[in-house]
Image (cartoon, rainbow, N blue to C red):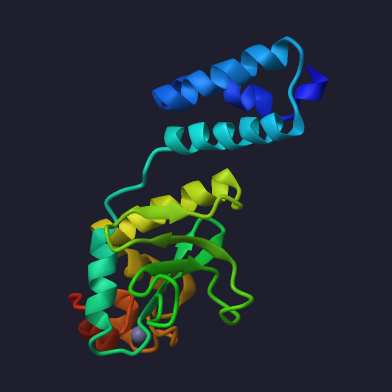
Amino acid sequence: MDGLGPHFARLTDNLDKLSASDRSFAESLIAQGVGRGLSMKQLEWVRRLAERAEATARPRLVGFAPIVTMMLEAQDILRRPKMVVRAGELDIRLSVAGQNSRTPGCINITSPSGDFETRKFYGRIGKDGVFDPSLSIEPDAMTAIVTVLRMVAADPAAAAAEYGRISGSCSFCGLPLSDVKSLRVGYGRICSRRFGLPWG
Ligand SMILES: [Zn+2]
């Protein structure tokens, strides 16, 4: 089945994920592919349907709305609220997409350093609290990212404190934790107020 390209098996494996009309179209393409082969245009449809089936099969990552709420509330005080946490080997940065972006008010998840052009994009949390991961990230790295985002959603103070302990810096403003109490809490006092978190 060499002539059927790399997407044919993806489609046959995921047929049951398609809607009824897409499935009957896919089945006719498969039957014809196995028989006399497919045209370029039909092979393109095989790819499209395979992608559609896999997108349906992918679980939706829900439940991140508390992150959106916390960040947008902080935006009343800060122009550009952000937070950095550790996801496995990576530091990731949560920031509010600006008014001029395509998705204002959503939370962008990126690498922490560099500017908008050079930061690596890991995904975005919508206002509905659904995390939409970048598909170009290694699965292991994405698992670590989702795990730490779940922690931030469930207990932002604990997530920020964890980062403070690992890095010695405040998760929110990036300044070194210098006084004893900040070191013990894991983030700075001013940032605790800005993000509505307890401080000791
Ligand atoms: Zn701070």
What residue is drawn where x is 37% and y is 57%?
Answer: 149
Taking the image as drawn, is residue 176 in sight? yes
Ligand 1: quadrant of the figure: bottom left
What residue is drawn where x is 55% and y is 65%?
Answer: 121
Closer-to-camera residue (57/189): 57
Q: Is 143 drawn above or below residue 14 in the view shown?
A: below
Residue 84 in which image quadrant? bottom left
Give residue 8's position: percent from left, percent from top: 67, 24
What residue is drawn where x is 20% and y is 75%?
Answer: 197
Closer-to-camera residue (194/97): 97
Residue 129 in which image quadrant? bottom left
Q: What is the quadrant of the C terminus in the image? A: bottom left
Q: Is residue 28 left or right of residue 155?
A: right
Give residue 66's position: percent from left, percent from top: 23, 62
Give residue 191's position: percent from left, percent from top: 29, 84
Closer-to-camera residue (61/152): 61
Q: Is residue 112 left or right of residue 38?
A: left
Q: Is 37 drawn above or below residue 158 in the view shown?
A: above
